[in-house]
Image (cartoon, helix red, strand yellow):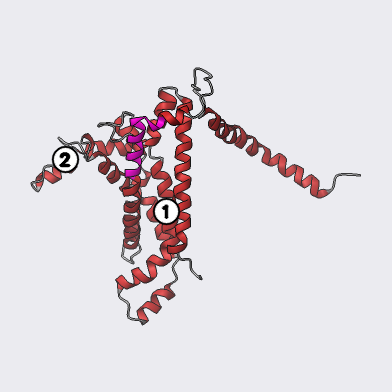
Amino acid sequence: MGISWHKRERVWGWLFASPWIIGFCVFFAFPLFSSIYYSFTSYSILQPGEFVGLQNYRTLMQDPVFWDAVYNTVYFTVFFVPLSIIFGVSLALFLNMRVKGMAVYRTIFFLPTLVPQVALAVLWVWLLNPQFGLVNGMLASVGIDGPAWLGDESWSKPSLILMSLWAIGQAVVIYLAGLHDIPQDYYDAADVDGANWFQKIKSVTLPLLTPVIFYNLVMGVIGAFQQFTLPYTLTKGQGTPANSLMFYVMYLYDNGFKYFKMGYASAMAWILFLIIMLLTGLIFLTSKRWVHYQGR
């Protein structure tokens, strides 16, 4: 008895999907589960290492640089994510206005997103140079002595937040798409009720934009905890001054690929994974109270 048509279709489906399945297993699943084991070993790239149990995790709890990296990352996340939402929504509302030449303005605000992170870092190092930088030059023209910015432990993280906010064009585009998805009928009803522009934004725009804000909030938190390229380029991987720009993923990278402490780095990776999963789950739980979907 021959093979049925449905079975042949299933076999061919698995055959066509097999390259992706093999790639997923070899390049994602195997390294992922291997890292769990390696986090309990002293494995390095040069030596196989030995099973050390929870030693890597205990050492991390006593590592001052680890806690500096945790603090810097949390600091960046706490300030950057809310500011990116506030500035992103504000810019989207401005760019949603019906003004002549608005396409040009939208392009201008999106252009920084196209700049590579390394080029962005080089540009801002020049702008924030305490001696001949453009920012301090403008402040000096109005009688203000600008700080050392990236060279000052107190100003280094705010400087990084400023740089990151300069390139939120991608989030602005998503907010714009969300604004275009809001039916005009709601605004017409608000006009009938005599609502002003502020009341429309408060009672119509923001509630119906909350699904987009929720998405950008989740992605923003995940991205902020994985901040790497910009601070690494700014400090050449040193995290200076005084480890004020040593971020979690930077220290993870240093342990894995500079010091070859792969087991130690694997332990850091899984701690980061658990933190991100916990925060993401918390955001999803609270979303039921503030995220409003049309038709509900």
**In the displayed structure image, the side of residue 136 where residue 97 appears, left or right:** right
Question: Which dot marks residue 267?
Answer: none
Q: Which amino acid does label 2 sit on?
A: Pro
Q: Which residue corresponds to mark 2?
A: 147
Q: Sequence-wise, which precedes: disc 2 or disc 1?
A: 2
Question: Can you give x and y, in whole percent of width and height, for residue 257 in the image?
Answer: 43, 25
Q: Which of 282 and 195 is in front in this view?
A: 282
Residue 222, position in %: x, y? 43, 45
x 18%, y 43%: residue: 135
Left or right of residue 289: residue 30: right
Q: Is residue 102 above or below residue 56?
A: below
Majority secondary structure of magenta residues = helix
Q: Position of residue 244 (x, y in %)?
A: 28, 35
In which quadrant of the rendered view does residue 160 lie?
top left
Residue at 72% x, 44% y: name it: 13
Residue 220 rendering spot, x and y as whole percentages: 40, 49
At 31% from the left and 64% from the top, the residue drawn is: 100
Query: What span is colored magenta in the figure?
Result: 60-76
Taking the view exactly as shown, the residue that stands out farthest to the top is: 47
| Residue labelled with disc 1 | 216
Residue 161 location, quadrant: top left
Q: Quadrant of residue 99?
A: bottom left
Marks 2 and 1, how far apart at CA: 32 Å
Instruction: Find out whether residue 65 is within the magenta segment.
Output: yes
